[in-house]
Image (cartoon, helix red, strand yellow):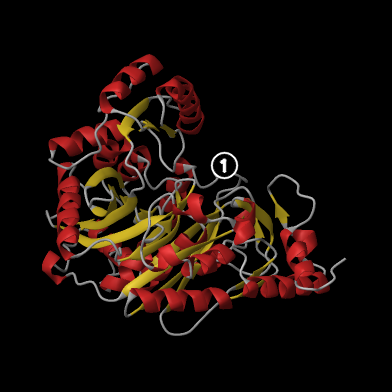
Amino acid sequence: MPPFSKLLVANRGEIAVRVMRGCRELGVRTVAVFSDPDRAALHVRTADEAYPLGGLTAAESYLRGDRIIEIARAAGAEAIHPGYGFLAENPDFAQACADAGLVFVGPPPAAMRAMGSKTAARTVMQAAGVPVVPGTLDPIPTPEEAARIAEGIGYPIALKAVSGGGGKGMRVVERPEDLVASFRQASDEALAAFGDPSMYLERLVVRPRHVEIQILADHHGNVVHLGERECSVQRRHQKLVEEAPSPAVGPELRARMGDVAVRAAQAVGYTNAGTCEMLLDQSGEFFFLEVNARLQVEHPVTELVTGIDLVHWQLRVAAGEPLGFRQDDVQIRGHAVECRIQAEDPFRRFFPSTGRVTSVREPAGPGIRIDGALEPGQDVTPLYDSLLSKLIVWAEDRPRALERMHRALGEYGILGVSTTTPFHRWLMRHPPFVVGDLDTELVAREWQPADNVPDDLLARAAILAALSEHLGQGRAAAVAVAPAEPEPRWLQFARRAGLRVP
């Protein structure tokens, strides 16, 4: 029996399509909402029904919780799935759904509020016996007070926004003389991004891994973890590559980290899918970072190694069903890797790239999965996130998974905008990554694009440049949001490969 008869997906792009596919497999009819630029998008055509939100920006469309609830009720939907981003971690929206008689597919508002403030979450976790990085449990009122506390903890320290995330409102301070200026800069950035200038500080964990634990919890007191994901490959504190399991985590450490994640969920009465993010230092000691109260972008790697469909279980749990398995039933099999294909130019410090997608050729074959909504003719604009699609592979072990990913990336052809594909291909053969020697500073330390252009990429760039010029489309449509340079990189590649492009 389907958990719901009809469900509205309050999102766009690949995650909206992913949720709709999961709904269809369970016999749930779906309702899409869309902004003006998305009127012909794939998620609109995938749904059984679609309704306009109007507007251009996210604030005018996908963040209009009142309008979304109004559409859900008019369409006869029983539930709303928020995907990730937008309204997914907004406790006021979750409460408004409940007040309107709609099921919110996610954790209860009280659990979201307990996790929304970083300092409140640290306090709750510490009381529950979950290890946290040494630092403050309350907001710091002034830079001078921060300096006094930092002297006691020891440098280097990390200043972080109380209401923050995604690296915004964060500064690393290595010397006492830099603290006051860094505090003011981070506080101003936090105010602009989150409307809250409050700061706290932690001891900086040097060259840590970013490892997270997936949890599922039902309304009957059952909480399980589904193992870990390695998310250390990041640029500007945002993830680029994820894999499961982590090459640094064995069965004993997995059990300990999983137990901590389960206790964290139980401490706040958490239900549905969530992720407990942690820092793992060089000695194997780990610390609580935060709980992401939603489905993660990188959830497919967990699905591939456990065989558990997270969207299906989100819907079943939201409908009141108990989890159909216990902790001992969860088995990790093989290895999965996900590369985020972003509309960014990795040769220009990952600046966003906009324009019209003129051609898409997707890889295929055994162990290949693509979660995306990318099509020729699609306009990539600065209005929304730069994520175009997710390329995920599975194989029997990590070496085979990396080779499969390298092959699949070589088959992935996208014309019209710059993408992160060249960076991913470099990474799959980069020796420290291949042997699993990772930390969150790897990209900043070792990605030097001027020195890391492989010969096969030069040849591919030359071919794509010539084809794009021949079609008369690529150069006119692609616009990189970056400082002007004397000459585009693809022209440099073409010349170096011996081709003359006017």
Q: Is residue 18 visible?
A: no
Foreground pick, 21 / 168: 168
Q: Is residue 466 above or below residue 164?
A: below
Q: Quadrant of residue 295?
A: bottom left
Q: Quadrant of residue 5?
A: bottom left
The percent coordinates of residue 55 (x first, y second) are 61, 45
* Residue highlighted by disc 1: 60
Farthest right residue in view: 502
Q: Secondary structure at mark 1?
A: loop
How many numbered marks appear? 1
Horizontal side of 470 relative to 236 (left or right) equals right
* Amino acid beneath label 1: Glu
Q: Residue at x 15, y 48 (%)?
A: 263
Horizontal side of 487 relative to 88 (left or right) equals right
Foreground pick, 351 / 374: 351
Q: Quadrant of residue 78?
A: bottom left
The percent coordinates of residue 343 (x first, y second) are 60, 58
The percent coordinates of residue 247 (x first, y second) are 30, 65
Q: Is residue 464 above or below residue 316?
A: below
Q: Is residue 363 above or below residue 221?
A: below
The percent coordinates of residue 139 (x first, y second) are 32, 23
Q: How many residues crowd mark 1 within 10 Å: few (<14), some (14–19), many (20+)?
A: few
Q: Is residue 377 visible?
A: yes
Q: Residue at x 19, y 35 (%)?
A: 124
Farthest bottom residue in view: 365
Horizontal side of 300 relative to 467 (left or right) equals left
Locate the C terminus by quadrant. Answer: bottom right
Q: Is residue 442 above or below residue 98?
A: below
Locate the N terminus by quadrant. Answer: bottom left
